[in-house]
Image (tube, rainbow, N blue to C red):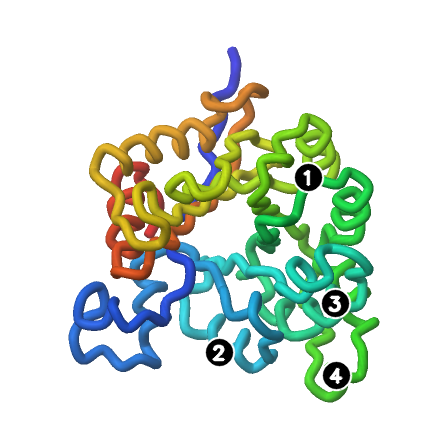
Amino acid sequence: MTAARPNRRIRIGVSGWKYASWRGDFYPRGLAQRRELEYIGEHFSSAELNGSFYSLQRPQSYLRWRSEVPEDFVFAVKGSRYVTHMLRLRGAEQGLANFFASGVLALGAQLGPILWQLPERQNFDAALVEAFLASLPTSTGEALELARRHDERLDGRAWLEIDEDRPLRHALEPRSDTFADPEALSLLQRHGTALVAADTAGRWPRFDALTADFAYVRLHGAQMLYHSGYTAAEVAEWAGIVSAWADGSGSSDGLPRDVYVYFDNDARGHAPHDAEALAALVGALV
């Protein structure tokens, strides 16, 4: 008799949470802004941290965010644009050291995948991508060793401790169709890095290949990038995809996967409502 394969956890949430258009709509009128993340934690099981993309955050911020959500809530953290958009993955070790020293590790057990979003002009370069993926820490212990090599800009404000050594997951969101190259998929698989499935209203290519033991989905809008809401039919379609990836029926290897889904169609306040609709369909914990 074959044992039943368990469904892996599906986490559905939003990309960021500080949006004026959500106030008095998703957020109840009168809710203090300092309690918005707490409210997110009551409704979802995960969220993307976006501020880390634009600048190095401080340990105190990560500790505060962690304290405002339930213990089983998970943060996906967006990697530094200094690494992805300025260095364009070249010579990135110092940038990675500073990023991991900035306080990311203070999230502890609530640290989820690290998202690396590439610029549209970044074409697939096998040697470059191989070197970058090989430089990414695969555990919090490795990340700590890397963080200890931070430069003087982090002196006196670095977070250099972990409570235990945990595996680290990375996801790559390219915006060039050159990443459809089978060699790119092979590299990602070899390094256990998830290729992000991004819905961008046709602006950038959508990749659906599963290259890791988890899947990462970013929903930026099906009709208008960042602006349009998802119809009931579109939510149902994504519910089918996500559920099939989670139970293994939608993957070529038949293996169940953890699935992280984030709505980024926040310009007109659709993201949290769409996230709730999808969570209700897949039965995710929210």
Mark 2 against mark 3, which lies toward the viewer?
A: 3
Against 80, residue 238 (above or below) is: above
Q: Residue at x 62, y 68 (%)?
A: 104
**Looking at the image, is mark 3 or mark 1 earlier in the sequence?**
3
- Residue corresponding to mark 3: 95
Kind of residue sitting beneath label 1: Gly
Which residue bears the numbered disc 2? Answer: 64
Q: CA distance from mark 4 to mark 3?
A: 11 Å
As helix, strand or loop, the secondary structure at mark 3 comes to: helix
Residue under label 1: 192
Instruction: Give the mark toward the camera: 3 or 1.
Output: 3
Q: Nearer the viewer, mark 1 or mark 4?
A: 4
User: Is 184 on the left or on the right of 71, as rendered?
Assistant: right
- Location of residue 84 by image quarter: bottom right
Q: Residues within 10 Å of mark 4 (few under 14, many from 20)?
A: few
Q: Is residue 233 left or right of residue 211?
A: left
Looking at the image, do the residues carrying marks 2 and 1 touch, with CB atoms under 8 Å apart? no
Task: Look at discs 2 and 1 and give the one toward the viewer.
Answer: 1
Q: Dot 4 corresponds to which residue?
A: 153
Q: Earlier in the sequence, mark 2 or mark 1?
A: 2
Is label 4 in a helix, a strand or a loop?
A: helix
